[in-house]
């Protein structure tokens, strides 16, 4: 039996923010604000995204250099299922 991976609270919040903003690029500042982690170090978003990519796959979150990140359309269903688990 395969177990469903679980995300920590901050990882879930970041993934939910990406889902809420699907179809558009989200800056680090906006992502941190939407995920409720704006009071943490700026680079904390980066480490949370690395953790999420380990679960969803390296290509699930697209980096747009100098602008931010976006959840790729093919990863939306998997992200929703992960958050619902």
Image (tube, rainbow, N blue to C red):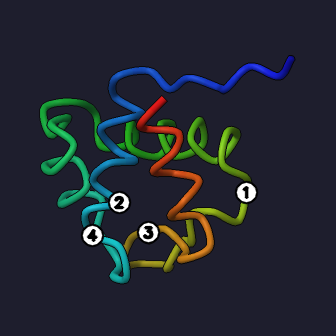
Image coordinates for residue 75, horizontal then vertical, percent: 59, 64
Say if 53 sits above or below 6 in the image: below
Find residue 19 and report its image quarter. bottom left
Image coordinates for residue 32, horizontal then vertical, percent: 22, 47
Mark drawn on residue 18: 2
- Earlier in the chain: of badge 4 and badge 1, it is 4
- In three-dimensional space, the C-alpha distance between marks 2 and 3, rounded to whole angstroms, equals 8 Å
Find residue 10 and report its image quarter. top left
The residue identified by callout 3 is 69
- In three-dimensional space, the C-alpha distance between marks 2 and 4, rounded to whole angstroms, equals 5 Å
Say if 43 sits above or below 69 in the image: above
- Earlier in the chain: of badge 2 and badge 3, it is 2
The residue identified by callout 1 is 58
Which of the pair 18/75 is nearer the observer? 75
The residue identified by callout 4 is 21
Q: Are marks 1 and 3 in contact (CB under 8 Å)?
A: no
- In three-dimensional space, the C-alpha distance between marks 1 and 3, rounded to whole angstroms, equals 13 Å
- Classify mark 4: helix, strand or loop: loop
- In three-dimensional space, the C-alpha distance between marks 1 and 2, rounded to whole angstroms, equals 15 Å
- In three-dimensional space, the C-alpha distance between marks 4 and 1, rounded to whole angstroms, equals 19 Å
Residue 53 is left or right of residue 37, and the answer is: right
């Amino acid at each position: 039996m395969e177990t469903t991976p679980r995300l920590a609270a901050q990882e879930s919040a970041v993934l939910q923010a990406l889902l809420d903003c699907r179809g558009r690029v989200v800056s680090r500042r906006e992502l941190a604000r939407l995920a409720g982690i704006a009071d943490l170090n700026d680079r904390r978003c980066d480490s949370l995204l690395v953790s999420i990519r380990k679960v969803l796959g390296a290509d699930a979150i697209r980096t747009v250099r100098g602008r931010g990140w976006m959840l790729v359309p093919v990863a939306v269903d998997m992200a929703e299922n992960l958050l619902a688990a």
